[in-house]
Image (cartoon, grey):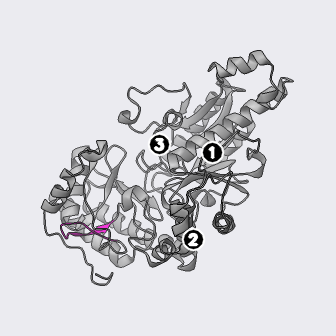
Amino acid sequence: MTIEALVPQVRTEFPGPKSREEMARGALDMQSVYRALVIDDAKSQGVFLVDVDGNVLLDLFANFALGALGYNHEKLASVAKSEAFLHAVVNPTSTPFVTTPSWFDVLEGLARFAPRGMGKIYCVDAGGEGVEAALKVCFIAHGEKRRVGAGQPKSPLELDVAEQARIMDNAGSDAVVVSFAGAFHGRGLGPLSATHSKLMHKADMPAFPWPTCEFPSSRWPLDRHADENQAREARSIAELERILERHEGKVAAVLVEPIQSEGGDRHASPAFFRRVQELAASAGALLVLDEVQTGVGMTGSYWAHEQLELPRPPDLMTFGKKMQMGGFFVTNEHAVTQFGRMYQTKNGDRARAMLGLATLETIERDGLLANVRDTGAYFLARLEELATRHPHMTEPRGKGFLLAFDLPTVQARDEFLKRAMRRGVFASYTGVRSVRLRPHLVTTKRDVDFAIAAFDAALGELA
């Protein structure tokens, strides 16, 4: 089945009989309760997802934004068939300690796509793990600075025996991370303390007592709500100033997403982020931008923060999802080099990194950033047209292919998604009552038109 042969078509209910049969075999998996589809990953092509029942869906879900180039892209397939990829898969290495020339090939390639001013990279397996590691860098920098300021050794190995024993007995640090309401930074116990998007993420979990600042959450359309948005940002900045003052000397990091994704696709202006960077620096804290979902072309630039016009690079920037691995970029100033301080067995899956680099190279080769900007603007304009016809659809918003809109209730949002799916469009949810759209970067205006027609019909039925 070729890309040209695929058009959205729905033959069965969801999940269909073959999907249900397959799902029954997955009882060992604790997470089987979440399963919505069983796809045929050999027949799926480009932006079209094919399930085992033969249903063909326009995929605006992209597996929670994991997908970048669509299904079975020829560039990724060629990398996967290469000798270097084969050897990377069957010969795992403790990459920081023992590696192969293929790892240096990847690093040389990734250096071209590193954010401006960020000369080092740290690689792990997934985005949330990358956030966890980035916060460790912040705590290390904070602790070393405090020790030096107090006339103590910078290295923990040079502390006296009593202080070393105190540390080993879980005395820990009183340093804090400032995060924002509505944020999602991962489910590890460190990032989870900075995550504030859904109760189910945090219930019953122990958490660090870190402060939380309100996020502005711009109203859309931006020009119509300019005064309100400016007031929201002023309140958020004032609260951040109070938090930093209250925790003076103890703030290791300010952690923020350029666009809150899991929290409901919530935006703020570039001016807001410039002020956040300024305040973090004044407080002696590192600014960490979480680009796990916003990075790798999603907003029309390789990294969303490139559109914020920051006067200098962030101190750290995390990545994941479309990179096919997790980790962070960091400025040379804050790179941790002391032996054993930041180390995990792998710290770089060579095979996954090859796919991440191939994704970035394909975005560059095929001009996909321009496609995201152009087609994304077209998609947003079409969503705005829908909102004029369907008043229960509100606040269409987005940048590039990171798009969303709201419906009146959770129930209405979930019913809309079901009806859109029955018309051949697979989308997802975010926040409390928002529809999340995450097109693959190869999505065209023709695909957008199909989605809009399906949305129009589904919204009409909900009215």
Dot 2 or dot 3, earlier in sequence: 2
Discs 2/3, front: 2
Is residue 409 visible from the viewing direction of this image? no
Q: Which mark is residue 84?
A: 2
Q: Is residue 116 above or below residue 189?
A: below
Viewer-nearest residue: 158 or 234: 158
Judged from the image, the secondary structure of the residue bearing numbered disc 2 is helix
Is residue 234 visible from the viewing direction of this image? yes
Viewer-nearest residue: 247 or 442: 442
- Left/right of residue 79 with respect to residue 102 in the rendered view: left
Find the magenta span and give its range.
Answer: 48-59
Q: Residue at x 60, y 60 (%)?
A: 307
Instruction: Count up the numbered dots.
Output: 3
Q: Position of residue 308 (x, y in %)?
A: 62, 56
Dot 1 or dot 2, earlier in sequence: 2
Residue annotated with mark 1? 288
Judged from the image, the secondary structure of the residue bearing numbered disc 1 is strand
How crowded pointer 3 is (Cα within 10 Å; few <14, some 14-19, many 20+) is rated as many
Tell me how far mark 3 sits from mark 1, CA to CA: 13 Å
Judged from the image, the secondary structure of the residue bearing numbered disc 3 is loop
Q: Position of residue 109 (x, y in %)?
A: 65, 69
Tell me how far mark 2 sits from mark 3, CA to CA: 35 Å
Task: Give the residue type at disc 1.
Answer: Val
Task: Give the residue type at disc 3.
Answer: Phe
Q: Position of residue 327 (x, y in %)?
A: 59, 51
Of all residues, the one furthest to the front in this rendering is 91
Q: Does the magenta portion include 55?
A: yes
Task: Give the residue type at disc 2.
Answer: Ala
* Quarter residue 176 falls in: top right
Q: Are marks 1 and 2 in contact (CB under 8 Å)?
A: no
Residue annotated with mark 3? 184
Of all residues, the one furthest to the right in this rendering is 151
